[in-house]
Amino acid sequence: MKTLVILSHPNFAASRVNKALSQVAKGAVDTEVRHLEGLYGLDVARIDARAEQEALRGADRIVFLYPLYWLNVPPMLKAYLDAVFSHELVGSGALRGKVLQLALSASTPLSEYSKQGAIGYSMDEILTPLKIAANYCGMDFAVPFISGGFEPGEFSDDAVDAAAARFGKLLRGELSSSEYQI
């Protein structure tokens, strides 16, 4: 399965988790990593929609790798979606049957994403717009890969290594159902 990882992080230089996961992806078989801020900086007008659409067309699985950013995707990933997922691309059926896989990290522990938790909404509810977008495009929405509790300065290298190992298993198709959200 050819996998395209679309990485977005507004401060990648300071990232430990997403940096580690992207390194795993770069070493995975049949996997291409496109780091939006690395390609385009923070200038949304520089996004090359045609090049990005060609990359999407060549993939079987599309992974959005990002930190949860104010309960949403980071600004460059949102701009990418707006520019690349055009009516022309979606209408052509080019994304139909492809898998959309989210791989996100959250600073808050996942237990807080519930009606009873500090967030007040489940992660499933928060990801609804991306599920709807995948459905609209005819894509298969995979179970999200989520790592929580990565508050800056409050997590260990072991936690990063564990998330990276799980991500490697995901990319190889070896992740068990109990390992998707930790």
Image: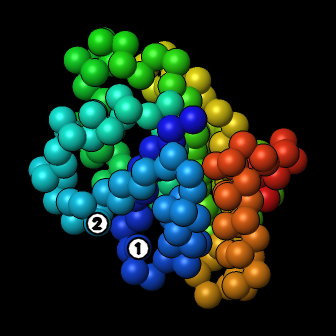
Q: Position of residue 24 (x, y in %)?
A: 58, 64
Labels 1 & 2 near each other (Cβ < 8 A): yes
Q: Relative to 153, say whether 57 is above or below.
A: above
Q: In which quadrant will I find the C terminus? A: bottom right
Q: Residue at x 51, y 46 (%)?
A: 30
At x 68% / y 75%, what residue is drawn? 160
Residue 57 lies, in percent from the top left, at 35, 29
Question: How far, Cα to Cα, is label 1 from label 2?
Answer: 9 Å
The foreground one among 178 and 62 is 62
Residue 131 locus on image (x, y percent)? 55, 29
Which quadrant would residue 159 be assigned to in this image? Answer: bottom right
> Regarding mark 2 in the picture, which secondary structure is present there?
helix
* x and y percentages locating residue 78 in the rendered image: 34, 46
| In this picture, residue 132 sits left or right of residue 75 | right
Q: Nearer the viewer, residue 26 or 110?
A: 26
> Which residue shows up at 67% across the image and 58% down it?
168
According to the picture, the residue beneath numbered tag 1 turns out to be 12
> Going by the picture, which residue comes out furthest to the left?
45
At label 1, the amino acid type is Phe
Residue 40 in view: yes
Give residue 38's mark.
Answer: 2
Q: Residues within 10 Å of mark 2 (few under 14, many from 20)?
A: few
Residue for point 68% across, 48% down: 172
Q: Which mark is residue 163?
A: none
Describe the element under mark 1 as helix, strand or loop.
Answer: helix
Q: Give left or right: position of 42 versus 103.
A: left
Identify residue type, mark 2. Gly
Q: Is residue 67 visible?
A: no
